[in-house]
Image (cartoon, rainbow, N blue to C red):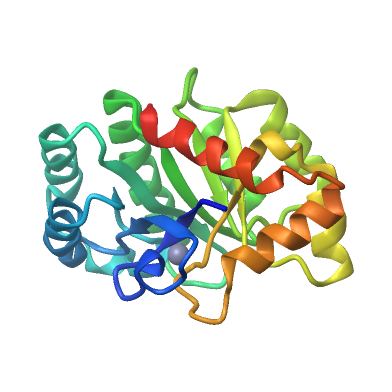
Amino acid sequence: MKIIDAHSHIEYISHNIQPDVVGTICCATNESDWNNLANITLNDKNVYGAFGVHPWFVDTIMDGFDKRLYDLLKLNDSFMIGEIGLDKYRPNMEQQIDVFERQLNVAIEMNRAIFLHCVGAWDKILHVLKQYKKLPTIIAHDFNGNNEIMQNLVNNYDIMFSIHRADKPTEIRRIEQISIEKILVESDAKPDVILHNVIDKISDIKKEPNAGEIIYKNTQRILQK
Ligand SMILES: [Zn+2]
């Protein structure tokens, strides 16, 4: 089985550790990661970079960060946007929304996939997304919204869901609701997440023996855009 880890961070490059993982999408969390991640992608062709400022780190932004993000993306067609989004349990919601919108503007301008973090703030995320006519592919990482939010996203956006938990009844029910064509798998930089096992669980839940191959192709589609 060939697996691409659809969401990790620079401190954990899963394809160097898990034998059937052939590639890792690494998300930056703040601007001080960007150079380092860009260098890693140049030295290891199996690392794919997503650049941005995570909602936990919006207080680290410096003037013109969105212009520098735009300039960085211009250097390489394969660079994507992430990890960006909103988190209800962190401070500065107004600033989080401002930083999120500024990065969405760059993603739209450059037409790059967006790796999205959302905790407890789907109402706000949907409100922000509604302002835009057309958005690139969005990958909701560790999706925790309810069925209604999922349907809203599926009906209105080119949305994918990257999954690393498939144990609890709520997680299993959520996976049952998502079309296999929209599923990716991720370690989220957690060494105890064995992606092969996550795929086996998804395969059981979806009763799809080819889940691994389908998920691999889903991920490749994002990387080829
Ligand atoms: Zn992450």
Q: Residue furthest bottom?
A: 192
Classify 135 as above or below 45. above
Along the line of sight, which residue is nearer the eye, 32 or 168? 168
Ligand 1 shows up in the quarter that is bottom left
Q: Residue furthest top?
A: 133
Classify 95 as above or below 129. below
Rendered residue at 32%/41% (across/down): 80
Whole-percent x, y for residue 60 in the image: 23, 68
Rendered residue at 77%/42% (across/down): 178
Which quadrant would residue 200 be assigned to in this image? Answer: bottom right
Q: In the displayed structure, does residue 214 sit left or right of residue 71? A: right
Q: In the displayed structure, does residue 18 sit left or right of residue 168? A: left
Rendered residue at 27%/27% (across/down): 110
Q: In the displayed structure, does residue 64 sit left or right of residue 91? A: left
Whole-percent x, y for residue 14 in the image: 41, 68
Q: In the displayed structure, does residue 31 sit left or right of residue 101? A: left
Which quadrant would residue 125 be assigned to in this image? Answer: top right
Along the line of sight, which residue is nearer the eye, 101 or 22? 22
Which quadrant would residue 204 be assigned to in this image? Answer: bottom right
Rendered residue at 49%/72% (across/down): 90
Residue 153 seen: yes
Whole-percent x, y for residue 199 in the image: 68, 58
Whole-percent x, y for residue 50 in the image: 31, 49
Q: Quadrant of the C terminus?
A: top left
Classify 59 as above or below 48. below
Count how many numbered circles sit on residues in the image. 0
Classify 127 as above or below 118. above
Residue 51 seen: no
